[in-house]
Image (cartoon, helix red, strand yellow):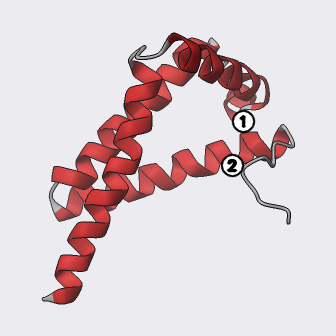
Amino acid sequence: MASHLATHVSTVVLGLLFILPGIVKTVRLNTTLYREMLKTFKNFTEVSPLRYIGVIPSPQIYMQSMGVFELLLGTTLVVGHVSFKKFACLGIMALMLLTTYCQVALKDYSAVRTE
């Protein structure tokens, strides 16, 4: 019982952790934040592994599509059936691998504490 509850709570929290950034990337809530995100995605577009297969989206489309994926996958984690949640986890892992690749390619280690 306790492990079932812990699993449910953790999937809801993880889903919300992807829904909120997905909203920030797709809806222009704050102009300054939106512009900063766009600058980041301009850099991501330049080093994205998608360019190796000929896909070079504009930074805005790249940012908004990542936001839509985060919204869909996060919502699936929060309210989806168990089998769909497994696929959502795979999708989230793919998004995180793509983001990690871009940050390593840019040598952007600002999220890693070096102290």
The residue under label 1 is 49
Identified at 73% across, 39% down, the residue is 102
| Amino acid of disc 2 | Thr
**Residue 101 percent across, percent down from the top left:** 73, 46
- Vertical placement of residue 36 versus 113, above or below: above
108 relative position to 64: left or right = right
Whether label 2 touches label 1, CB < 8 Å: no
Identified at 72% across, 36% down, the residue is 49
Identified at 87% across, 43% down, the residue is 107
Disc 1 residue crowd, few under 14, some 14–19, many 20+, Cα 10 Å: some
**Residue 57 percent across, percent down from the top left:** 62, 15
| Amino acid of disc 1 | Pro
The residue under label 2 is 100
Examine the rendering and report whether any part of residue 79 can be seen: yes
- Vertical placement of residue 17 versus 70, above or below: below
Image quarter hosting the N terminus: bottom left
Examine the rendering and report whether any part of residue 57 can be seen: no
Callout 2 secondary element: helix
Which disc number belongs to residue 78? none
**Residue 59 percent across, percent down from the top left:** 63, 16
**Residue 71 percent across, percent down from the top left:** 34, 36
Task: Kindly indicate the quadrant of the structure image that contains residue 2.
Answer: bottom left
Identified at 38% across, 38% down, the residue is 20
